[in-house]
């Protein structure tokens, strides 16, 4: 094995360890535990629609607005915002996110608020039939539990192949949002 191959193996092992450590407190939420009134619940029975929900617990309570701000300003999502802007999405600054109320129609990069309630916000990131993606943030347990869910039309073989990466990323970005919240509220 040459030096580049060894370095690649070490980098992969270190990355796996970091991801494992960062997401150790993130739990998958059974879709059966969602209330029918949850904004994301409407997609659970939609044909060819993948739905996933993850949760993590906070020591201090927060509101869904603070969670959404921390989510979009988290270290991991900062990178995603840069990548999205390079791909042509509108740039959104931290100051713009700080000023948001997450009312219907508000935009963060490619994400548009389509509905919000006291403890949850539903975003649509593509209205086209081919992709039809949504992100959902919510709080429960008096603001001590953060929930992050996503939906994706999974008719295409490509989507089914990259789904494991999506599921890992969903956990990483939720852990990053928790980190951001704890960093800004301590």
Image (cartoon, grey):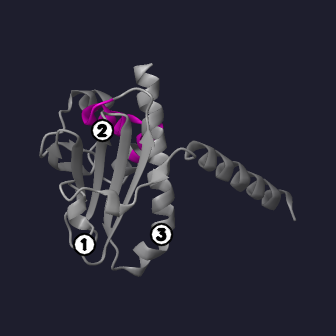
Judged from this view, the residue extending furthest toward the top is 186
The residue identified by callout 1 is 45
**Is 109 left or right of 58, judged from the image as shown?**
left
Check disc 1: other Cα within 10 Å, few if <14, some if 14-19, many if 20+: few
Question: Dot 3 lies on which element?
Answer: helix
Disc on the earlier residue, 2 or 1:
1
Q: Which residue is mark 2?
A: 68
In the image, residue 71 lies in the stretch drawn in magenta: yes
Tell whether position 51 is magenta.
Answer: no
How packed is label 2: few (under 14 Cα within 10 Å), some, or many (20 or more)? many
Residue 70 lies in quadrant: top left
Residue 153 in the image: state x and y as whole percent.
30, 71
Residue 178: image location, x then y, percent: 44, 36
Q: Where is residue 136 shown, x and y percent of the image?
A: 28, 51
Q: Is residue 156 above or below residue 62?
A: below
The main secondary structure of the magenta stretch is helix
User: Which mark, residue 11?
Assistant: none
Residue 51, by quadrant, is: bottom left
Please tell me whether residue 4 is drawn above or below residue 121 in the rendered image.
below
Q: How far apart are labels 2 and 1 at the CA level?
A: 26 Å
Q: Residue furthest left?
A: 104
Q: Nearer the viewer, residue 10 or 47?
A: 47
* Part of the protein shown in magenta: 62-80
In the rendered image, the vertical position of residue 109 relative to residue 52, given as above or below:
above
């Amino acid at each position: 094995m040459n030096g580049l191959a060894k370095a690649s193996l070490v980098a992969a092992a270190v990355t796996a360890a970091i991801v494992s450590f960062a997401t150790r407190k993130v739990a998958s939420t059974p879709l059966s535990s969602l209330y029918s009134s949850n904004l994301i619940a409407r997609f659970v029975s939609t044909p060819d629609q993948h739905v996933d929900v993850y949760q993590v617990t906070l020591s201090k309570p927060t509101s869904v607005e603070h969670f959404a701000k921390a989510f979009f300003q988290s270290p991991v999502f900062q990178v995603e915002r840069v990548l999205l802007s390079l791909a042509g999405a509108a740039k959104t600054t931290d100051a713009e996110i700080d000023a948001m109320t997450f009312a219907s129609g508000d935009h963060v990069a490619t994400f548009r608020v389509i509905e919000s309630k006291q403890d949850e916000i539903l975003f649509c990131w593509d209205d086209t039939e081919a992709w039809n993606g949504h992100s959902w943030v919510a709080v429960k347990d008096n603001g001590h539990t953060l929930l992050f869910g996503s939906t994706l039309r999974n008719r295409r073989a490509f989507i089914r192949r990259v789904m494991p990466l999506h599921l890992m990323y969903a956990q990483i970005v939720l852990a990053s949002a928790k980190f951001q919240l704890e960093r800004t509220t301590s």
